[in-house]
Amino acid sequence: MFYEQNKENKRNRPKSSDILLSIAIPTYNRSKQLKYGLNRFLSQITDDIKPLIEICVADDCSTDDTPAVMKRIVRDNFFIHYERYEYNIGLEKNLIACTQNCRGKYLWIFGDDDFLEFDDSLACIISLLKEGCYPFYILNRTRRSFDLSKKISENWMGLDFSNNKIYPRLRDFCSKWGIISIIGFISVNIFEREKFTAVIPDKYWGIMYPQLGMMLEAFANHPCLLVTRPLICHRTQTQEEKRAALGEKSTEKDFMSNYQRRNAIYFSFRLIRFINALIDCGAISYNELKTMREFTFSNILLIEFILKNIELSVLLKLGDDTRDWQMALTFYKHMFLKDKYRGIYLYRLIRNLKLDRGDLEGAIKIGEKILISFHEKQDYEAFYRIAVESQKKMKFALAHTAYIRIANDKYAGYELHAWALFKSGELALENGNEEEASNYFKSALRRNPNHTKASIFTTSHDKKLKVFISPDSSYAEDDCIPVKMELTNEELWSYYFSYRFPDYVAFYLDEHFQEENISKLLNLVVNHIAPDGAVNINIYNKDLFSFYFEKIKKLSIILKLHVNACDRKEWIYIKKKMRKNFL
């Protein structure tokens, strides 16, 4: 798996009995960030610390200049060891593989883009480890943007720095902070290496946190110290940055593709399997899980977080394994056998299972049972989604019953009331009953005057339909219905204007609008406005105005549009059919 990169340094390394701390860094294609982090370590490794420390960098077959960067660094630092895989094994496997050659008493798995926050961070850590009072240490952290231009948090856990906090057992810490939110982040944990490596990782593969399962199995019943001062910094990537960095690796593609897909795949059934393994080894119990909240997941209960993700897996059509569903049902039955109130989670699970299996009648029946006993917003939203799915499957009577159930329930909220009434209007149109449909649309608008589709549908045909389209709907022209959507979202253009094309469309263009999308935008305009419809494009930047006007003018010839400009107000007018004095 490895080939050796610095054999001479390996011969010069101190005896394993002398090494207090091994820092294991799994890396892939982050040579710049890795170099920055290592230089932060090197600036703090004084002569008295050098014999006590080793840094082991495990390269997952990077395609950038990581080998060249590491060759220069290891040449002058005997305590740094670099190994590179002959092929890519993926982040999850590397989180464990990077520890295999470590020899210190304590182990610190450290992110390749993270770094020491303060100039004395390492000295503080070494001092604590020398005292040797605890087998497990947890570090508070700061957070910065990936390019370090912005500090997101100076104190991620919101702690008082005056005193470190002792927890009798690691599981006690998890009961307060969760199992993923804090210690799931690799760079905050320092622990006794031999206890960790004695755990077999096989049962913890699958959620991208194998080290977390091993830590909990090894240290759940051991004391730990929470170091309140944020000694390390966590670089925080946007979703796009994560995809760019790791998303093309087959082992990380799903995890990095988008947050919804990640949660649906890794934090639904797989997370239950992961937790079951911890329950089997005595690292956690059902009673602890009942009240355990996840600090960074909106501070919701872990079991609720899992259920939300199971529901998401159903919506994304990812939860189709009968064994997974049986495992989940058993998990929630065990947990809530004697707890009627929290049985709602079991009902939700069964509702999602029936929806996944296409049993819409069953899903509606269980969903209604939930609404009778509980009045949670998420359950009304789920009930509404089942009704929509029923409408898509042309089970109109079932959908109509569900919509009316929502519309007449005071706990559902005015927004869902409006949507349920609007969808009932759509069903009436399907049946050719325009008068009934109109009444439903008007009722929807009364419940929610800002309901966009209801506003469109209730505009009489003898009156011009005028809309203003904006991504944030923060501004609209007088007499225009505000429509919140991205200008080039073809699906939403069809969604809003399938019933009736607008007679007048207005929107604005700014420097963020991409030039290559102009042609697509004009085609959408042509295909979604009335035959005599007009478009008003607002551009408030004079330089942009000239640029867009010339571009649109050229395209208008192809699309047979009439284009005119008003330089004084910086508007561009477009009309689908030429008519004298239309301005």
Image: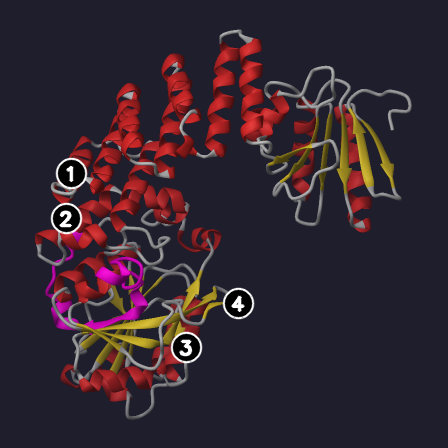
- In this view of the protein, can residue 491 be seen by the observer? yes
Crowding near pointer 1: few (<14 within 10 Å), some, many (20+)?
A: some
Residue indicated by mark 1: 327
Task: Examine the image and state in which quarter residue 111 appears.
Answer: bottom left
Q: Which residue is mark 2?
A: 276
Q: Which disc is residue 117 wearing?
A: 3
Q: Residue at x 41, y 45 (%)?
A: 258
- Do the residues under discs 1 and 2 have CB atoms within 8 angstroms? yes
Secondary-structure class at tag 2: helix
Instruction: Identify the amino acid type marked 4.
Output: Lys
What distance separates the C-alpha of mark 3 from that of mark 2? 36 Å
- Residue drawn at (38%, 23%), measured in percent from left and top? 405
Report x, y in % for residue 289.
19, 52
Q: CA distance from mark 1 to mark 2?
A: 9 Å
Q: Amino acid at mark 1?
A: Met
Tell me the amino acid under the disc marked 2: Asn
The N terminus, quarter of image: bottom left
Is the residue 554 above or below the residue 180 in the image? above
